Amino acid sequence: MSGRFSGRVCVVMGAARGIGLAIAERFGSEGARLACLDVSGRRLGPAVEELQAKGFEARAYGVDVGRRDEVHGAFEAIRRDFESPIAALVNNAVFARFQRLDEIDTETAERMIGVGLLGLVWTTQAAVAQMLQRGGGAIVNLSSIAAEHPTKDAIVYAAVKAGVIGLSRASAIELCAQNIRVNAIAPGMIGTPASIAQYDDATIAKRRSEMPMGRFGEPEEIAALAAFLASDDASYVQGASVTADGGWTVPSR
Amino acid sequence: MKRLEGKRAVVTGGGSGIGRASAIRFAQEGALVLVVGRADNAEETASFIKANGGKASAMITDASVEANVEAIVARCISDLGGLEVFFANIGVTGTNTPLLEQTTEEWSEVYRINTISCFLAVKYAGRHMVAQRYGSIILTSSAASLRANAGAISYSASKAAVNNLAQTAANAFAGAGVRVNAVLPGLVETKLTSKVFEDARTRGIEGKLGHVTPLKRPGRAEEIAAAAAFLASDDSSYVDGQLLSVDGGVSSTHPYGRIALPNK
C-alpha cells in the first residue's frame, strides 16, 4: 500500500491492544513513523516489538494520559526521538467501567473523565504545539455510539464519549486557522476481547440480531476509518463525527 | 492505493465535477468504471481514465429514468463483468424562487432527479448486490440537507430525503452484505455551483467563497472523491447507513467568523 502517512510522525494513544494496536498497524502499513503510548508498559512493550517486526518504525512510551505533566513530557520525548514534529494524533485511550447509578464512586468516575476526556485536552495541547512547527496536522478522537445511544450502566461512559464529540468540534473550530483538522469516530460494538468479555452470550446474540450488518466490527475496520480521517484524503472533512457501527443505530430500537 | 482492484463501479453524473473526479479516483484505485452521463463529457471522462492507464467505459443516458437505471446496471454487469459499487451522483439545484411562489412542477422535477434517482440506484443496484451478498451504494447528498440557507429550498428538502434513504435502505438490506451511505459535500465548484463561483469572480469576491466554513475555503471535487472512494472500498466495511459530511466543517458549527469573542 502506498503511504498516505509516509515519513509522518503519528501518535497513537492506547496503542497496546485492540483498536489502538490495529490503528498503529494500519498507519504503519501506510508509512507512518509510530509513537505508541499506553498506560501499561508491560502490554505496550511486546505490542511495539510486534510492530517493529513487521518493519515499521515504532517507539513505545508508557504514560498516564490523565496526568498533564506526563503527557507533555512524553510528547517532548517523541519530538526528540523522532527529530520531527507530530503530524497526526489518534486519541484512543480510555478508562471504562460500567456501573449502575448508585454504584458510581468518585475514584472511578474521576479516572474515567480524567483519562477519557481531560486526557484528550492534554494530548491535543501537546500535539498542537508540534503541529504548528510543520504547518498543520490532523487529530482523530475516538468517541462511541454511546454518546447518543447509550446502553444501561453507561452514565459516566456516555457523558465522557459525548464530551469527546463536543471537544472535537470545538477543537476543530479553534484549530482551523492553524490548518489542523479534528474529527471523531463513533464505533459501535467492536469485537475486541475487552468488549466481548463484558457481556454474556445471550446479550451478544441479541445485539447481533439488532444490527443491520448482523455482526460486530473488527478493530481493523475502525483503523481504516481512522486512517482516512487522519490522511489528506479527508482534507475537507472538519469537525465531523463518523459512525462505524454496522448500521446498529440507524433503525430505532 | 489500490483499494478497489478489480471492483466494477458505476458513477452517474460522471461527466463533470464530483462524478468525474470520483470516476477517476475509483479507476486510480483499480476499479473498472462505467461512467454515466447525459452528455458527451461522460465519454471524455472515460477516455481520460483510459489515457492514464485505467479501465473505463461510458454510457450516455439519463440516470433519473427507471428503465435507464435498470439498463445501467445490466450494462455494467455485461460489459464490465459485474457490479460492486454504485455511486448515485446526479443532481439539480432547484431555483431560488420565493417559497410562497414555488410550484409543484419544480418540486416534482427536483425530487425526481435528486431523490428518485437515488431510489432507483438502490433498487436496481441493490437487487444485484443483495443477490451476490456484497456491494456498496453511495448517494450524493449535501450539507444543505442538514441546514437551511445552503441551497434552494426544494434542493435542501430533496437531499434530506436522500439522507433518510441511505438509512432506510441500509436497514432494509440488513444482513445482506450491502452497505448504503451518503456523502454530504459542502460548497464545491461543479456544474451545479458554477454560477455562484462565476458571480463571485465577476464581483471580485472569490476570496469570500466558503468563508463561513471553518476551513475558510470551498472544497475541491477531488476531496469529495476521496471520501466516496473510502465509502466504496472495504476500508469502510463497518460503516453503514451513515451521512459523511465533507464540508470544511460548516455543518458542525454556527457560521464561523461572524462572532468576535474576546480572547481573555
Image: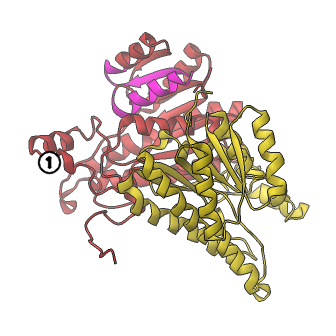
Q: Position of residue B147 (x, y in %)?
A: 36, 61
Chain identifier of the red chain: B
Decide if residue A84 is on the left or right side of residue B116.
right
Residues rendered magenta in the picture: B16-42
- In this view of the protein, which residue sits in the foreground, A216 or A210? A216
Three-letter residue code for mark 1: Ile
Q: Position of residue B44 (x, y in %)?
A: 35, 16
Decide if residue A91 is on the left or right side of residue B52.
right
Q: Position of residue A55 (x, y in %)?
A: 73, 31
Say above or below: A25 vs B25.
Answer: below
Instruction: State the residue position of label 1.
Output: B205
> What shade does chain A have?
yellow
Residue sitting at the far left:
B203
Q: In this rendering, does residue A240 appear at all?
A: no
Q: Quadrant of residue B91?
A: top left
What residue appears at the point 60 percent right and 43 percent down from the top-left corner?
Answer: A82
Say above or below: B88 vs A241.
Answer: above
Residue sitting at the far right:
A201
What residue appears at the point 35 percent right and 43 percent down from the top-left corner?
Answer: B219
- In this view of the protein, which residue sits in the foreground, A91 or B217? A91
Assign a secondary structure to mark 1: loop
Badge 1 density bin: few <14, some 14–19, many ≥20, Cα 10 Å: few
